[in-house]
Amino acid sequence: MSIRHFKSLLDINKKEFIRILDRSLELKKLSRQNQLPDSLSKMTLALIFKKNSTRTRVSLETAINKLGGNAVYISHLTSQIGRGESITDTGKVLSGMVDFIAIRTHEHNELVELCEVSTIPVINALTQKFHPCQLLADMLTFYEEKGDFEDKTFSWVGDGCNMCHSYINASKILGFNLKIATPNGFEPDISVLNSASDTVELCDLPGKAVENSDLVTTDVWASMGDEEDHERRKSLFKGYQINQNIMDKANDDAIFLHCLPAHRDEEVTAEVIDGKCSRVWEQSHNRLYTTQALLEFLKEVND
């Protein structure tokens, strides 16, 4: 049997996506009742991180710990990866020692290479191309409050980055309409766009992208690895800020999401991110429950 990995959202179908979301809600309830199961008892998750992390690392470590397992953190600065050991050799070694691998790295191809040799499930904890674990939490936040995704409209304003790519994937799977507004030259990858041409629309202005939207979201203007380009991007992205005037173009009950960390009064104003439409804190907490559900899912489909 081939191993089911989680390289992107496209590794699951709609039924499985909803299954993960429903299980996330169950685990959220059980957590509040202090009745979580030991569903991952004696299982170990290895975390290979080449990029900084707060929410992803904490959610992965805490998720498996609360379900009876444990996590091992592997920094490229203190492991043999930092001395040149290949990701494929590392993957072959870890496959005989642990039960899951999560990798956070720059190049998406490195994740793909790891999946090709790993005999245990591999989770994309972020690459430059996709951030699927975050999207599980984003979709849970909307699902819990609003219900079904069909006939809903989501808006992405800002850089056509890995988060934007994962929103495109989510629209393809769940069937919501996604409107995207980016500065010229910062559009999402054309191959990712083409895969969801029936559900995605590119807009020339942020206001147009947000009209009649049920969910508005963005990300920092300079993602990890783009920091040296920050000042130039601040000038180019100035008109793509999510402020109250932009939010007023969305539906009255629209929610605002941000994967965090946020730069207040840059890509989003403090008024919006700290305002009544914002769900960013619930969104960040949901990372724990969706990660737990994902780990359980990967265990079950690979048994």
Image (spheres, rainbow, N blue to C red):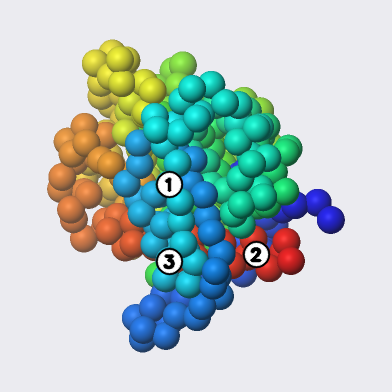
- Mark 3 highlights which residue? 65
Viewer-nearest residue: 197 or 107: 107
- What distance separates the C-alpha of mark 1 from that of mark 3? 13 Å
Instruction: Name the residue at 57% across, 48% down.
Output: 101
Q: Are marks 3 and 2 in contact (CB under 8 Å)?
A: no
- Mark 1 highlights which residue? 73
| Badge 3 element | helix
Q: Amino acid at mark 2?
A: Lys
Viewer-nearest residue: 268 or 297: 297
- In the rendered structure, find residue 299 and report the number of the disc placed on it: 2
- In the rendered structure, find residue 9 and report the number of the disc placed on it: none
Labels 2 and 1: the sequence-earlier one: 1
Q: Nearer the viewer, mark 3 or mark 2?
A: 3
Instruction: Name the residue at 45% across, 33% down.
Output: 79
Q: Amino acid at mark 3?
A: Asn
Instruction: Name the residue at 53% across, 21% down.
Output: 84
Labels 1 and 3: the sequence-earlier one: 3
The residue carrying pointer 3 sits among few (fewer than 14), some (14 to 19) or many (20 or more) residues within 10 Å by Cα, namely many
Viewer-nearest residue: 53 or 81: 81
Instruction: Name the residue at 73% across, 61% down.
Output: 302
Q: Quadrant of residue 53?
A: top left
Where is residue 197? Give x, y as percent.
66, 37
